[in-house]
C-alpha cells in the first residue's frame, strides 16, 4: 500500500484505516488485477457498488434535512447532480485519489488515470472501504468535508436562483440582514452595465455586475456563495 496515500488521508482528513487491505482494494483497478494474477488481488468493483449506496444515503439525508422547502422532484435532481460521474471524478481529483490508483499498463497508457468514469469508481470504492472499516459516521464525516460545503455553496442547486440560495445559507445561522446595493451604472442606455454589492449585516460579502439590476444581483449572490464555500 502506498504510504503517501496513508499519510495524506491521516493529515488531511484524520482517517486511519484499521484494515489497510480494504484501502488497497479500493484503489486497485481490474486491469491491474488481470496483469498481476499471481498476487491474488481483488479489484474495487464490489466496494464501488457499496460506496455508491452509502453515498446516496448520506446525500439524501443531508438534502432532506437542510432543504425542507424543496419538493421531492427538486431533491432528486439535486442529488443526481451531486452523485453523477462528473462530480465524483472531481471530488476524487480534489483528494488526489488519481495519483494512487493501481492500473494495468494498458489502462495507464490509454490515460485511464484521468478518465472521469474510472475516477468516479475509485471515489465510490473508497467510500465503500471506509464504511466497512469504520462504519457510516466515518463516511459522513469525510463527505462533510468534501461534498457538503459545496452543496451549501449552491454548486448543485441549478433549479434555484443564487439569491434564494444565499439567503437560505445565511439564515441557517439565525436572523440576518441581507441587502443589495447599486454601486454604479456604466455605458449607453441601450447597453448599460450595473454594479451591485451585497451586504450581510452591513458587511460586504460579494460584488457583481450585469446588464440589468437583477442579473447583477444574481452575480453578486453567486460570488458571495463561492466565498463562503472557500472559507
Image (cartoon, rainbow, N blue to C red):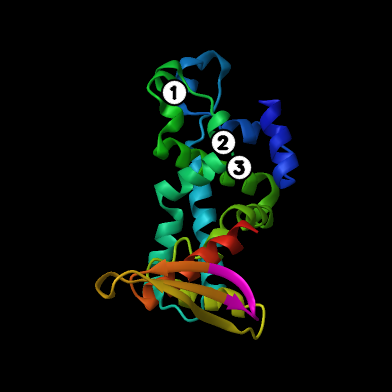
Report if residue 231 is visible in the image.
yes
Instruction: State how far apart marks 3 and 2 are (Cα).
Output: 14 Å
The residue that mark 3 highlights is 129
Instruction: Check if residue 200 falls in the magenta segment.
Output: yes
* N-terminal-most mark, 1 or 3: 1
Q: Residues within 10 Å of mark 3 (few under 14, many from 20)?
A: many
* N-terminal-most mark, 3 or 2: 2
| Contact flag, marks 1 and 3 (Cβ < 8 Å) | no
Q: Residue at x 56, y 56 (%)?
A: 147
Magenta residues span: 199-206
Q: Quadrant where the N terminus lies?
A: top right
- In the image, 75 versus 230, the foreground residue is 230
Instruction: Check if residue 24 falls in the magenta segment.
Output: no
Q: Given this view, does label 1 or label 2 mark the residue nearer the observer?
A: 2
Compared to residue 86, the image places residue 100 above or below, namely: above
Question: Which numbered dot is residue 97?
Answer: 2
* N-terminal-most mark, 1 or 2: 1
| Contact flag, marks 3 and 2 (Cβ < 8 Å) | no
Report if residue 160 is visible in the image.
no
At numbered mark 2, what does the secondary structure look like: helix, strand or loop? helix
x and y percentages locating residue 114 in the rendered image:
44, 32
Q: Quadrant where the C terminus lies?
A: bottom right
**Picture quarter containing residue 54?**
bottom right
Compared to residue 192, the image places residue 122 above or below, namely: above
The residue that mark 1 highlights is 31
Amino acid at each position: 500500500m502506498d504510504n503517501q496515500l496513508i499519510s495524506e488521508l491521516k493529515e488531511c482528513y484524520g482517517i486511519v484505516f484499521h484494515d489497510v487491505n480494504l484501502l488497497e482494494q479500493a484503489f486497485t483497478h481490474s486491469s491491474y488485477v488481470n496483469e498481476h494474477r499471481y498476487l491474488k488481488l481483488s479489484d474495487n468493483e464490489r466496494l464501488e457498488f457499496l460506496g455508491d449506496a452509502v453515498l446516496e444515503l448520506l446525500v439524501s439525508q443531508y438534502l432532506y434535512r437542510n432543504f425542507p422547502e424543496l419538493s421531492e422532484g427538486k431533491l432528486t435532481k439535486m442529488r443526481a447532480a451531486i452523485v453523477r460521474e462528473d462530480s465524483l471524478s472531481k471530488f476524487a481529483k480534489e483528494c488526489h485519489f488519481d495519483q494512487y490508483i493501481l492500473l494495468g499498463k494498458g489502462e495507464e497508457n490509454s490515460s485511464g488515470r484521468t478518465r472521469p468514469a474510472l475516477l468516479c469508481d475509485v471515489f465510490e470504492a473508497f467510500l465503500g472501504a471506509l464504511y466497512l472499516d469504520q462504519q457510516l459516521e466515518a463516511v459522513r464525516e469525510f463527505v462533510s468535508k468534501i461534498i457538503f460545503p459545496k452543496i451549501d455553496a449552491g454548486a448543485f442547486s441549478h433549479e434555484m436562483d443564487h439569491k434564494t440560495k444565499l439567503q437560505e445559507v445565511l439564515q441557517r445561522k439565525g436572523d440576518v440582514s441581507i441587502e443589495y446595493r447599486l454601486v454604479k451604472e456604466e455605458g449607453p442606455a441601450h447597453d448599460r452595465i450595473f454594479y451591485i454589492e451585497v451586504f450581510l449585516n452591513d458587511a460586504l460579502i460579494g460584488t457583481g455586475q450585469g446588464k440589468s439590476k437583477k442579473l447583477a444581483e444574481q452575480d453578486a449572490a453567486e460570488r458571495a456563495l463561492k466565498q463562503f464555500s472557500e472559507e
